[in-house]
Image: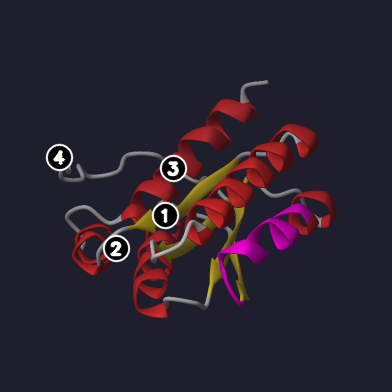
Amino acid sequence: MLKPLKPGTSRASGRTFAIVAAKYNGRYVDAMLRAAKSELIRAGAKEVKVVRVPGSFEIPAVAAKLAQSHLPPLSAVICLGVIFQGETSHAQHVGWGVTHALAQIQLQHKIPVIHGVFIFEKEEQARARCLGNKHNRGIEAARTALEMAQVMKEF
């Protein structure tokens, strides 16, 4: 069951973020991207760098490069993509590969990497989770990035 979003209270206080977003299934990813970027800007982010890649499988390569080489250091990297389950197991393989790679990136570079790559069975699921403001996963990803940036600052 989807829970409605509550107003965000986290502040970015001049922090820098990056969003890596797939072009594939653009209708849904674009909506999450707009929502995430707006939420970061609303919270006071100093910079939000957006990098587009062909599909979800390509997200980890760019996320790793950003985590490794960005100056000033990023507060978090948000990764956004949408995969639809087809008749084969390809979606699960892509999803697992992305999940594993993103986990490794955040451990290796000690930077929050927010996993916003979703596998949906039906377009109605994507519409409900990506296109509106009531349950938008892009907003949730941005709020997670803001919260994790604060947690990491405390260390």
Q: Label 2 sits on what residue type?
A: Cys
If you read the primary sequence from the N terminus, does the residue marked by circle 4 or circle 1 appear first?
A: 4
Q: Residue at x 25, y 64 (%)?
A: 122
Q: Main secondary structure of the magenta part?
A: helix
Q: Residue at x 65, y 38 (%)?
A: 103
Distance between the alpha carbons at the discs numbered 4 and 3: 28 Å
Q: Which numbered disc, 1 or 3, marks the residue closer to the eye? A: 1
Distance between the alpha carbons at the discs numbered 4 and 2: 15 Å
If you read the primary sequence from the N terminus, does the residue marked by circle 1 or circle 3 appear first?
A: 3
| Residue at mark 3 | 11
**Rendered image quadrant of residue 58:** bottom right
Q: How many marks?
A: 4
Q: Label 4 sits on what residue type?
A: Met
If you read the primary sequence from the N terminus, does the residue marked by circle 2 or circle 1 appear first?
A: 1
* Local crowd size for mark 2, using a 10 Å CA cut-off: few (<14), some (14–19), many (≥20): many
| Residue at mark 4 | 1
* Spot occupied by residue 85 in the image (x, y as percentages of width and height): 38, 61
Q: Label 1 sits on what residue type?
A: Phe
SS label for mark 3 = loop
Distance between the alpha carbons at the discs numbered 2 and 3: 23 Å
Q: Label 3 sits on what residue type?
A: Arg
| Residue at mark 2 | 130
**Rendered image quadrant of residue 84:** bottom left
